Every structure is written in structure tokens, then in C-alpha cells.
Image (cartoon, rainbow, N blue to C red):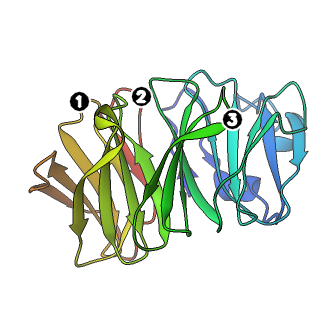
Amino acid sequence: LQCISDGSRPAMDLTKFFEDSEKKWKYWANPPQTSSESKSIKDGAIKEFSGHRDKVRTVGWNCHGDKMATGSNDKMVKLWKMSSTQAVAELKGHTDAVWQLSWNPTHPDQLASAAKDSTVRIWDTRLKKAAHNIEIKGLNISCSWSSQGNYVAVGNMKDVMSVIDMRNNAKIMKNMKFRFMVHSMSWDKSEKYFIITTGNGTVDILSFPEMTPVHRVEAHTGHCHCMDLDREGKLIATG
């Protein structure tokens, strides 16, 4: 994976910044910004956070950037603030590994977690408990909160995608079975388009909520595992 520069700062190979740590995650503050500075991430301030009892599978910042959530094979979701290396809260309830988290991009205290226990939980992190516990068949390994906060999409290992309507008391509004592997998913800023990356190496754009194909990009020769949209919603990075 590489970060492609626009010329204002150097491109950086991100793969060397990450370690295969079982129970820890790290946060790098103030990495080098110009070519005149050392290119090593070690020049930034590094904090190491410990607390999970098994492998950390997912991390994510809330929309204000002042709180981090982590999910682990130890069935726990933990909350962290940068003022301390100790977890500020534990969100308990899942009975199997937590594979992915997604914060509400419009609310700093609402968090979704997808786990292999066939549930998705919607947390109010201020109360430290689940506001909703949605049962979805299969081993749930991915989730994505929509750009305007109205929907949560969840994917499982059998390539079934479920959409939860957060405006309707977190009810499932749609289930869709794909004929190919779906690795990641997201919405555009308007929530009119739903975007997925596939095992065929493509990025597929679907109309939402109809889920009819609109456009396909032949992006990779192998699996397309991940993607991210820029803040303006005009560019998609894939890997």
C-alpha cells in the first residue's frame, strides 16, 4: 500500500509503519512532513496502548478525532483517549471476535461493531452500553456507517450484505446476496450511491437504495480488499 502524494509532501510507503502485534496498537503523532526532515516514523511521538487480551482487528477515530475505538478477538470493544495509554471504557456484549468498527460520521459518540457472533451492536459510548443489538445471520466481518449517518451496512463471510436503517429504530431494511466476494463497502457523500470492492478486483458503484449497478472500475488484477474516499467524496483509494 502506498500513499500517493499530490506534490506538497513526499509519498510514503505505509507498509513499513505497521507491526504484526497481537494485543497492542500504536499511534504516531506528528510524522515528518517535508523531505528535509528524517523520513523515519520514529521521529514522531509514539504511544503504545495495551489492554486487549488477544489480537486487535480493527481501529477507528470518531468524527471529532478525540476518541479511538478498538475491536479484538477477545470479544471486547475498548475506547481510548490520547491523554492516557489506558482504555477509558470497555464495551461488553459480543460473544465472539469483533472484526470491524465504524463510527457515525455525524455523531462523536455513536459506534457500530460487527462480530462473528452473528450480531451488530450500535453503541452509545457515553452510556457505555449498546443502544441496539441487531441479529444478522452469518459471521459478520465488515460494517460501514453511511456518510450522513442514516444507514449502517454489514457484510458477512457468505457475501451477504445487510443495510440497517438507523432512522427506523435500527431495523434491517435490505439483505442482498452477491455472487462474488465483497471485501469493503461505503457510501458517497449524498448517500445516493453505494460502493463495494470485490474479490474480482473491481470497484462497483450501485444506486442506493435500489442497489442497481451504475458503474464498474476494473481496479486490480487480484482481490480488492479495501478502499477509502477522500473528504470531498471525489476520489477513491483502493488496495
Residue type at tag 3: Lys
Q: Quadrant of the N terminus?
A: bottom right
74 on left or right of 122: right
Labels 3 and 1: the sequence-earlier one: 3
Q: Residue at x 64, y 39 (%)?
A: 129
Q: Nearer the viewer, mark 1 or mark 2?
A: 1
For the residue pair 83 and 163, the one nearer the viewer reads as 163
Kindly identify which numbered label has been placed on residue 128. Answer: 3
Residue to which mark 1 is pinned: 190
* Up-down relation of residue 21 to residue 172 (above or below): below
Query: Percent position (x, y) of residue 167?
Result: 30, 32
Contact (Cβ within 8 Å) of mark 3 with mark 1: no
Q: Which of labels 3 and 2 is toward the front?
A: 3
Q: Position of residue 81 (x, y in %)?
A: 79, 29
Per the image, label 3 sits on a secondary structure element best described as: loop
Circle 2 packing at 10 Å, graded few (<14), some (14-19), many (20+), is few
Is any atom of residue 40 visible in this view?
no
How far apart are the alpha carbons under marks 3 and 1? 30 Å
**For residue 231, which numbered disc appears in the image?**
2
How far apart in space, not on screen, are marks 3 and 2 (Cα)? 29 Å
- The answer to whether residue 64 is left or right of residue 200 is right
Q: Quadrant of residue 187?
A: top left
Q: Is residue 25 above or below residue 10?
A: below
Residue in the picture at 78% in, 37% down: 89
Question: What's under tag 2, amino acid-wise?
Answer: Arg
